[in-house]
Amino acid sequence: MDIDKIRNFCIIAHIDHGKSTLADRMLELTGTVARREMKSQLLDSMELEREKGITIKLAPVHMSYKGYDLNLIDTPGHVDFSYEVSRSLQAVEGAILVVDATQGIQAQTLANVYLALEQDLTIIPVINKIDLPASDVARVTTEIVNLLGCQPDEIIKVSAKTGEHVESVLDAIIDRIPAPRPSKQPEMRALIFDSYFDDYRGVVLYVRLFDGVLPKNANIQMMATGSNDIALEVGMLNPKMSPRAELCTGEIGYIVTNLKATREAKVGDTVTLAQKRASKALPGYKNVHPFVYAGFFPVSNDQYKDLKEALEKLSLSDSALQFEPENSPVLGFGLRIGFLGLLHMDIIRERLEREFKLDLIVTNPSTDYHVTLTTGEELDIRSASDLPDITKVAEIREPWTKGEIITPKEYIGSILELIVRKRGVQKNVSYNDTRAIIDFEAPMANLLTDFYDQLKSATSGYASFNYELAGYRAEDLVRIDFLVAGERVDALSVMAHRSEADAIGRTVTKKLKEVIPRQNFEVALQAAIGARIIARETLGAYRKDVTVKIHTGDRDRKAKLMEKQKRGKARMKRFGKVDIPSDAFTVMLKRD
């Protein structure tokens, strides 16, 4: 294929703005997929993606149109999967920016535009959903012109649902997006932008060739991990695998390898030929660091091995998933898993329960903390229960995020109040026509649980939110322990700022009182910082009427039986065990 006839591009947008629907129409118009095989969200192969109506995994596809080879990568729109978007942008020369005509520019739209501009990509702006009665094309056009500095006639107005003007998008891809330009490196170099594990074929890599030619059965090497292997099969995705004799410069395709784990071929790594190894790797490789952690415990300890095997299988196709063993006196053996965000955590939990038929208890999500001991030693703790004795701790640093909220102007006051409540600091407010963009910084831990829900409530659902990690800061942090019947439950422990500790202690003990069932003896539910109790709720005992069997009104006999019952309840209180239901471990998620 002539390199001047290749166009590589991806589709970027905020969640639910119509990326996958636009990709469907392109596949139809280019004849890549026969009409009888067509279905909505064709590139979203996962059951959860179809159910939730969102893209979770990026999907590449090769199309032919007017003698040109078009390589499309459909990317996720949610902030949790922004790393998938960033590595897709490194594999292409252009991006189609899709904006919903009814909603306009939103937080993730801005974030994706900045990522595309960093890569110096050609951006084709597209306004989607022009067929809807609520669409406001004029207002959205003004917003895009202000954002990109383009001319109004450069913006293509389409309806991805009906297919209106989608041909104009394909023509613009050919006219505006430049052809790939090989560098002056003589050796073969390809960027891995995604990988997954196939049960029958091993690890399959999705790559973009920047230099050279990759023939079938070539000996290849991963430059970051040093793994050597054979390219058993190479080819394009149409969207099914279509084998070829070789992949050439500028093309996007797949490599079937003999590797047994995706850890040996990490996303962002450079593939080169083992005999003619490249001297310099392609830019863009970085390890993904999760910043949300939660404990996953099987309801029955018999399922621990199944849970571990299931996570190992999922991690083969999700390079961001990290986990390590965890043991709890109450919950038994489990795993502490790292995620990119709460949606990522929710997706993994649902996949474990559906695909692997596991019954799980998930503890409250938390972030990681950097701890400096008095000896000078540095620790990275991912659970409040891992915090050493406070007398040995010199400093605790928590992660802060840089956030961006786009909202109609009338909701600015309520949003600023919400940011202050979350210990955040407002940095800047700028205006774009009828909308305001609020830049702020806030502790990651305070945005984990219910910030997004509260933001949507405060703005009647109109605000959108995007964030990124801004570093770690030393704060006055304490560990809040929760005691049930005098016994500390490590899985319930949380880290919090000292100023918020009392309120969290009172709220969680009240919530635990609602969730934990009553026992035959009185149960004390307490929140404590060290040895100091900061909140308490008492779960009353069931009281059996022991005097019902006395048919006379003898006071002495009644008093004797009541005293006997009192002694029995006191003994039960000393030796009795409280069965804590799984709902108790997620009370922080439902704090309000």
Image (tube, rainbow, N blue to C red):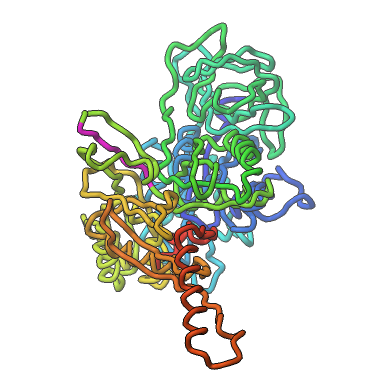
Query: Which residue extends farthest right?
Result: 36
Foreground pick, 33 / 295: 295
| Image mark count | 0
Residue 358 as seen in the image, left or right of residue 507: right
Q: Position of residue 220 (x, y in %)?
A: 59, 15
**Prevailing secondary structure of the magenta residues:** strand
Q: Position of residue 271 (x, y in %)?
A: 54, 20
Query: Which residue extends farthest bottom?
Result: 553
Could one spot residue 129 in this view of the protein? yes
**Which quadrant does the C terminus fall into?**
bottom left
Quarter of the image where one finds residue 32? top right
Q: Position of residue 43 (x, y in %)?
A: 64, 46
Identify which residue is drawn at 36% across, 60% down.
143
**Which quadrant does the N terminus fall into?**
top right
Foreground pick, 564 / 82: 564
Span of residues in magenta: 367-374
Residue 14 as seen in the image, left or right of residue 53: left
